[in-house]
Amino acid sequence: MLTDQDLPWDATLFLPPDQERTLDVLREAARSCRACDLFFSGTQTVFGEGPERADVMMIGEQPGDMEDRAGQPFEALDEVGIDRSRVYVTNVVKHFKWVARGKRRIHSKPNAREIRACRPWLDAELEDVQPRVVVLLGATAAQALLGGKFRVTQERGKPLEDTSLAPYVVATVHPASILRAPDPETRESEGRAFVEDLRTVKRLLE
């Protein structure tokens, strides 16, 4: 039986050759990834979805996160006039990390080692999609790509240039955090702020 010590902790070993790296080929290759411990409990690999050469790439924390709440970000995209068919959606790790609580599977944040191990998949997606704007949803995604000192609460909605990710990067909250707001008024105000962050993205595309 495999243990943590047996794992390579680097998904580079599972990537297809450079000349074969279309999104479909990457997606199929990711199904066999055993780079980190998340594959032990992950029911399936969930790769990114969307078109090659998308205008926008939205990056969340992990599967089971954005997929369960997909309505909120896409409704906001519609509201600001971003064509959702031109949006690629993915996560910094490709398996859902969870802990058992009774019969329920409770979300657990991926650690830095797991995020680093999965990074080659995300880099390959970025290279293939070449988005004009990257939108980082939540602290885990933002700190994974912009460094541990980055604070979404302070920098949300502000376009960042001169990054290696895309011509523009915009960080905002994860939609799940809006749903966890303590009362309807806070949820409404946070929802409006999220929409305004996406209006910034829309302006960058014009």
Image: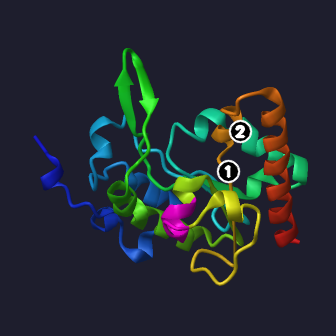
Mark 2 vs mark 1: which is more N-terminal? 1
What's the residue at 71%, 56% (across, down)? 87
Identified by mark 1, the residue type is: Val
Res 22 visible: no
Quarter of the image with the C terminus is bottom right
Give the magenta-colored segment's residue range: 142-149
What's the residue at 70%, 29% (across, down)? 182
Which image quarter: residue 26? bottom left
Q: Residues at badges 2 and 1 in contact (C-beta under 8 Å)?
A: yes
Identified by mark 2, the residue type is: Ile
Find residue 140 and name its label: none
Side (left or right) of 10 relative to 150: left
Query: For this rendering, which residue is in front, 105 or 56?
Result: 105
Whether 145 is drawn above or below 84: the answer is below
Element under label 1?
loop
Query: For this rendering, which residue is in front, 174 or 127?
Result: 174
Image label count = 2
Quarter of the image with the N terminus is top left
Element under label 2?
helix
Which residue was labeled with disc 2?
178
Find residue 173 and name its label: 1
Q: Position of residue 86 (x, y in %)?
A: 75, 58
Side (left or right) of 49 relative to 4: right
Q: CA distance from mark 2 to mark 1?
A: 8 Å
